[in-house]
Amino acid sequence: MNRGSVMPFIFRSAGLLVAYLVAAQFGMVFGTVGSSVTIFWPSAGIALAALLLGGVRYLPAVFVAAYLAALSIDAPPIYALGASVGNTLETYIGYSLLRHFGNIDLSLRKVPDLFLVILLGGVIPSVASAALGPVTLLAAGVITPDILPVIMWRWWRADVLGVAFITPLILVFAKSRFSFFKRDLAWEMLALWSASFFIGQNIFLGWALPLVELDQPLALAWVFPALFWAGLRTGRRNTGLIQLLFISQALASAYLHTGYFADDFVQYGLANFWMFSMLLAVMGMALAVLASAQRRAMYRLALNAKVFAVSNDGIVITDADNDIVEINPAFTDLTGYARGEVIGRNPRLLTSGRQSREFYADMWKSLVEFGHWQGEIWNRRKDGSLYLEKLSIHTLTDENNKPINRIGIFSDITLSKAEQETVAHQAQHDYLTNLPNRLLFRDRFNQQLAMSKRHARKFAVIYLDLDQFKPVNDTLGHQTGDQLLVAVAERLTSLVREIDTVSRFGGDEFAILVSEVITRNDVSNLAEKILVALSEPFDIDDHVVSVTGSLGIALYPDDGGDMETILSHADAAMYQAKRRGCNTYC
């Protein structure tokens, strides 16, 4: 622990100590009638909440607070020690059980989390404190053996009630991410608190209700409408405070011997008070948790509906029979079909006919085996136009893993796909002649090289440079020169096979990848055809242009085993052809 975190920890430990002692005094003063043990020990709930929120490092503070609480009533040292050890052990056991077996969300968003806090944090670990505390009382001579079981039973109930009532209240306040006060509920909360206060005062303390004359106080059941009101409308935190209000009034009733619990200790040892308080703690908070979960579910439902409505992606939902049950507005925008035109129909109404049966068979195989499919598919709009869409389909299943709905989410990628293909084409092709550039030539060369190595075949590269091209540019202009290069590219392309590649490397330099040759004569024959074709005049913009070419030939594997080496040999052979007078090959 670094210095920066020591002081906050000390202050929080001191705060825990003070809160524990105040709660202990509250329990001992108002939860104890006569000379018996208290029926309500809120300090147990505070201690457990402190460990759940801050960890076991607060355990020493719990021990010190429990020891001081025992000393505050002039208890014998042996009892003070036993009670503090028991209370500390109870808190640690509850913390450990919840951490290792509960796996709870401390914000208590689910009812099972609330029940686990009460069971693992209160019901089970309170046995430790209920055993050690009374035994030390017996050892100190404070109680006699005949009443030991009664004291243990009462001690256990006090700690369980403290955890059930106080721990959830602290947790929901500490872990909440939203403001407690809601402006739109201000008047309703004021009415709720006013009604709850006066109902409690009437039932537990015998106060008269304002503006209402009653022959006798209200029945105890009247607290539950207020509790339901708080749970359903105002959330977990406010419900916890309403519970605290009612239990405080009930304790006052028993302490002052007035109202509903006036004679509960004499007749039942505050058993009725304990049952009422446990019911209040469990029912009120559980109802609030359920209501909060329902509000969150409604919020998520409204949010999902909003996303469904405003999404730019088309969304279609089908049932188990693959009939459309719902679409969003974007579906209509993308396909042209209105909602009434597609509900109850099969999505195949969008089929373009461009996909094969095997395509759809693979799609359904993926949906059946994995529950989802994603890919690109051509579909047809209502007006008959085709579009390419990126489609994701997800399957919703029931508890038996049987499909109940499928959700398709798609977007029109026709333009973006065309743009991608255009960019890819431009990156790999010469802008002037539309021939493959050096990048694409290298890719095809490597493919041919791998194939030739695998099958022990030969291939060749012809490097071509136009003779006397510069005078054409200088005398007739660059535009004519460009048109000449385009015409040369067309003639070269017409002379090779589909499996061959004609590429322009730049300027008046061309390279031809000749696939699958047997002997050098095969390449020589092609070179001669190229020379003949180039020697024929070109008619460009009313100009008759004549050029020739110098060709260099390199053969794999005779002249090298990689692109750089083979191109180097072809380039050297081309310059040798030029030295021989041009319009030839070497």
Image (tube, rainbow, N blue to C red):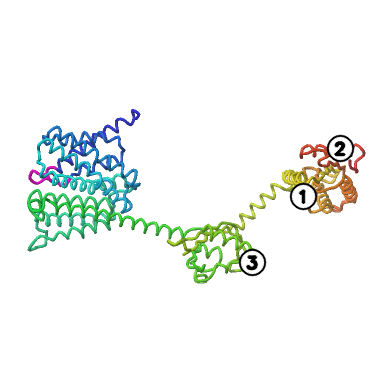
Image spot of residue 11 (x, y percent): 26, 33
- N-terminal of the pair, mark 1 or mark 3, is 3
Q: Residues within 10 Å of mark 2 (few under 14, many from 20)?
A: some
Q: Left or right of 203: which side holds 334?
A: right
With 235 as the anchor, is 576 left or right in this view?
A: right
Total labels: the figure holds 3
The part of the chain drawn in magenta is 28-40
Closer to the camera in the image, 127 or 360: 127
Closer to the chain start, of discs 3 and 2, is 3
Give the image quarter of residue 65. Answer: top left
- Residues tagged 1 and 2 counted as in contact (Cβ below 8 A): no
**Residue 215 seen:** yes
Mark 1 and 3 residues: CB-CB less than 8 Å, in contact? no
Residue closest to the eye, 498 or 357: 357
Callout 1 crowding tier (Cα within 10 Å): few <14, some 14–19, many ≥20? some
Q: Residue 189, percent across and down?
A: 23, 55
Pinpoint residue 215: horizontal percent, then vertical percent: 7, 63
Q: Quadrant of the C terminus?
A: top right
Q: Residues within 10 Å of mark 3 (few under 14, many from 20)?
A: few
Residue hosting label 1 = 433
Kindly identify the amino acid type of the residue bearing the numbered disc 3. Gly
* Residue that label 2 marks: 575
**Quarter of the image where the N terminus is located:** top left
- SS for callout 1: loop
What residue is shown with label 3?
Answer: 353
Please tell me whether residue 452 is drawn above or below residue 403 in the rendered image.
above
Q: Position of residue 290 (x, y in %)?
A: 31, 56
The type of residue carrying mark 1 is Thr
Residue at coordinates 89% horizontally, 39% vertically from top-left?
Answer: 577
Q: What whole-number distance in Å separates the C-alpha atoms at marks 3 and 2?
A: 54 Å
Secondary structure at numbered mark 3 = loop
81 or 74: nearer the eye? Answer: 81
